[in-house]
Image (cartoon, rainbow, N blue to C red):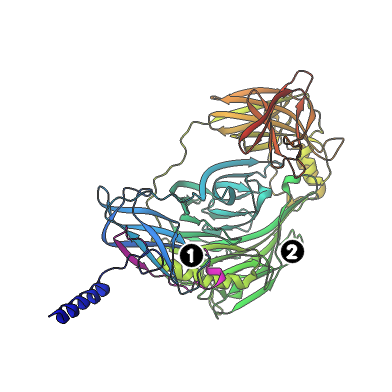
Amino acid sequence: MRKRSTVCFLLLIIIWLILAPVNLSYGGSWWDDGWSHRQDIDIPVDTNSDIAKYQPIDTRIEFDESCWAKNKDEHSIRICCLNGNSWNELESQIYNLRHIGENQIKSCNIVFLIPEFATGDEQYYIYYDDSEKPSTDYPDHIDIEESFYHYEPIPGYPLESHFYKVIDEGYIIYAIAQEGQFMGYDTSQHVTKMNDKITEVKPKNGNLFAAFDFKYCYGEGLFDYSSTSQHLVSKEIFVNGNLMVEVGIVSKSNRDDLQTTATYKYYHNPTSNTRMHVHVKHETLKEVKAESESNTDGTYASIQCGGVKSNSIEDLNFGQILPYMHVFNEMNSITEYSLDTDPEYIPEEPDIRVLSIEDDVDLGNKAWISFDEGDTGIAHSVIISSNSVVKSGNDERDGIQVNAFEMDYPHLPGLENNMATIQIGRNSYEIGDIHDLIIPENFVVEFDAEFFSSKAGGFNIVQQEADIFQELVKIKPPSNDEFIDDSDETEKHTLSVFVHLSTSTPFGSALSALLGIDFSYINVELHKNEELVYSGTAVKLPMKPIPELDKLTFVEQISAALFSFDWKNLSFFKKIRFPDLEPGEYTIKIYKENPFFGKERKYIGFATLELSDDTKTHVHCGIEGALYVHAADQNNEDVKNAEVILLKNDNVVAKNHTDEKGNTLLKAPCSITEKYAVKILYNGFVMYDDTIRL
């Protein structure tokens, strides 16, 4: 009897071991016994490769059991990775929750990153519970903000943008243009890749851009084009999370014949590679016809690299043309094309063809293009999810065709804009057939894309990235296509600034840009919340825009610059006008550029004001003063990275950080009557506070 009882007891233990969950957090089959439910997450790529590390997983989860979640911040959801015998909780983010009760959800989208320790053998699970759990306390790595800047160093050539700035760990990675202009071209749906460790969006801080506007040329002139880069319809921030941000932009052409709806997703990325995911829908609103000699006959996307060179305006020196472009072609092989990093200026034929429509180069199944330095080094690319993109269109041929060109425009004695552009668009030509110039009224193109950049991998890493992107995009949730226009309806005002006691060369800015000679001029900067929003030249007699300077002879260029005066806005004092400003507090900073003595510009004027209506203000300038600061602790040791701030009436006039030796230099306008407050902060604490006269 005892023997029989012992056997039964052993059988019960065996059955229990088989059926009961083992909730061991030290490396067993269950992460935490405080959670009741889990589901597998299938990762459709090999995570063992270097390029797989920190790839974003963005997918939709349908829960098999009841899942407690109040909102995107308060929920029971955790992502866990079993790597060998080790459990790791991964930072995650949820969005687009579908509620089935007050605090219960049936599904949601979830984002997490492939961990650095991934080997390809790890397993991923989503844990959840039907009861309340503590909120996650994951760091908020990224942010997205709206911003604006306007520079116009040359009349008629504004550098202007309303944009979303994408911030990762305090640095701006991308600027997504809602609308704007750059050297005469419109820029809605353009994404600028910023340089490393940038905290302010300025033209000189940009590296290159990828454009996702829909475009065709209707004439032979440089600006004879219709494009969805021209007019903003609506915009919206959909998601602003700890690992992913998403925005949407709808734009149209000025001719009301094209429309683009695009959503942009950026995922936190601790590596030097950068990627922006884009979902694009292009459509025609009526039938259009492209110009017969044009290679731009329905462009879906493009990437442009290049550089602006100015001999006399420092902020107009940035960018470069890389030596190669590569295309993954329809034979499913990679073709290399050499580029001229400093293309010549050809007035009769400004675009120098690298690839034309007649070359009939189509993208293959990997569907990517790149500017790069070759096998290794820098690479910037646009990757398309598939080369099958046409959703509707009478007699339209599916596929994606490539054309590419270089250009030097405008070409002036003191200013060059060298650029190289790769365009991908309609499959409008096959060898032996006619060039299809008609884009039908019902034409719709839709695709996912990635704007990818690498510092070291060359075009080879683009191929690796394409392999992963095209697999991961298959599990991504559909993009949001329900826009609630959040375009700003705030009242706008105009600020006119009159500048006094500031000598400079008449028309110094225009002459400097045209001739490349350092003529002095007065530059006025307008800041809001310590961020530059406007920069322009203060003059007594403004100049009207000068169209297409490159078509004029040298003598005609000088004549046009000197005699295209705006007599209606003649002023006795130097003046600059800032339109379309939101109400709020602004800071005005005035500089003398290219001063008569010294190479650096001089900070000669400062003022603040609260703008609530159209306003005129006068700023009296002085000479530039300097404050040298050395920071040391109680042991007389140098203190680096201390923040030194110069203030006037609690407004920041200048600030800087101490270097390795505890030294820094601040410059500001000075006079015998002006006093400033000086504060030195270290780790957020005020270490010094006093008033001085420069």
Which residue ends up furthest to the right in the rendered image?
A: 597
Rendered residue at 54%/24% (across/down): 613
Rendered residue at 84%/40% (across/down): 599
Q: Is residue 377 magenta?
A: no
Q: Nearer the viewer, mark 2 or mark 1?
A: 1
**In the image, is residue 359 above or below residue 552?**
below
Q: Which residue has dot 2 on it? A: 341
Which residue ends up furthest to the front in the rendered image?
A: 2
Residue 281 position, x and y percent, is 44, 59
Does residue 416 appear to the left or right of 5 in the view shown? Answer: right
Q: Secondary structure at mark 1?
A: loop
Which residue ends up furthest to the top in the rendered image?
A: 673
Residue 419 position, x and y percent, is 69, 59
Q: Secondary structure at mark 2?
A: loop
**In the image, is residue 563 above or below residue 40?**
above
Residue 166 position, x and y percent, is 54, 50
Mark 2 or mark 1: whose residue is earlier in sequence:
1
Does residue 555 appear to the left or right of 348 in the view shown? Answer: right
Disc 1 marks which amino acid? Ile
How far is disc 2 from disc 1 in space, using C-alphas?
37 Å
Q: Which residue has dot 1 on it? A: 114
Residue 22 position, x and y percent, is 31, 68
Q: Which residues are magenta?
A: 32-55
Residue 572 visible in this rendered orientation of the protein: no
Disc 2 marks which amino acid? Thr
Residue 84 visible in this rendered orientation of the protein: yes
**Quadrant of the rendered image containing residue 5:** bottom left
